[in-house]
Image (cartoon, grey):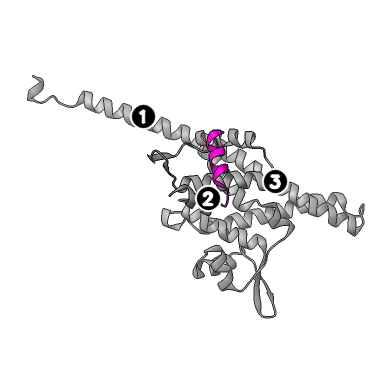
Amino acid sequence: MKIRDLVQRTRISKETVHYYIREGLLPKPRKRGRNIAEYNDSYVDRIRLIKELQDRYFLPLAVIKNMLKNQKKSSEGQSFLSLRSEYFRPVNQLLPNEIVGEEAFRKETGVGKRWLAKMEEWGIITPEVRHGQKVYSQDDITLGKLIVEMDESGIGVRDGFDPEALKHYRDLFREIVVMSHKYYIGAALGKLTPEEFSKRIVKGREIMSVFFYHLYRKLSREEYKRILSVMEEESKGAEEEERNTEEQAPQGYGGL
């Protein structure tokens, strides 16, 4: 695409595009002529990410430049930034959204009719019924989108992932939530007014959500390293066995 198309799709000025290139926030485009440069979709994604980091997290361009530089070196960084901007938007918490009706929910999230029914059966997505209509919360919307994202990222049914694992996750997390509330309520019951208790519960929920998020990331990294180490050892063992087999194989006439 030409720069005018890039400007139209990203809603920034031509001067801003050139500035980002000079500052190293964008790579230099491929030249098709002396005054003609060609831009692809990666420029659109990069500019949108820059604006996302500026508008939502108020980061200066110098910091964003370093983040983008590190992003190239880390596949985890790429996944984190894209998922963070999509599913951790503070405005969604401050102005929670609701969707009325299954059809509108499926259109918004991309979840198929059969899988929506299954997720509701398993208690992962739990709409309220108001005036005979299903009403889906912001959490339900986010979970629906994430389920579709999982499928598109290679951890879905088509890739051999057992979808019933989601039900087991839900059951395990229900136990964790009940346990954490039991510990907290036991410590606070009788010591706080209902108003004070409600405020602490809301704050505690957000803190514990962040705690579980980081705990999962930490444990997942540790498990990944363990599995990778096992795979590398098995690969070395297989290579050694193959070499031994080749050395012990009978020589053909060409070896006499």
Q: Residues within 10 Å of mark 3 (few under 14, many from 20)?
A: few
The x and y percentages for residue 146 are 56, 56
Q: Nearer the viewer, mark 1 or mark 3?
A: 3
Q: Residues within 10 Å of mark 2 (few under 14, many from 20)?
A: some
Quarter assignment of residue 131: bottom right
User: Which residue corresponds to mark 2?
Assistant: 7
- Seen from this angle, which residue lies furthest top? 256
- Magenta region, residue range: 10-25
Badge 3 or badge 2: first in the primary sequence: 2
User: Which residue corresponds to mark 3?
Assistant: 210
What is the chief secondary structure element of the magenta stretch? helix
Q: Is residue 196 toward the left or the right of residue 247 in the image?
A: right
| Residue closest to the eye, 218 or 227 | 218
| Residue closest to the eye, 140 or 44 | 44
The x and y percentages for residue 233 are 42, 30
Badge 1 or badge 3: first in the primary sequence: 3
Residue that appears at 50% across and 58% down: 163
Q: Residues within 10 Å of mark 1 (few under 14, many from 20)?
A: few
Q: Residue flagged by tag 3: what amino acid is it? A: Val
User: Which residue corresponds to mark 1?
Assistant: 237
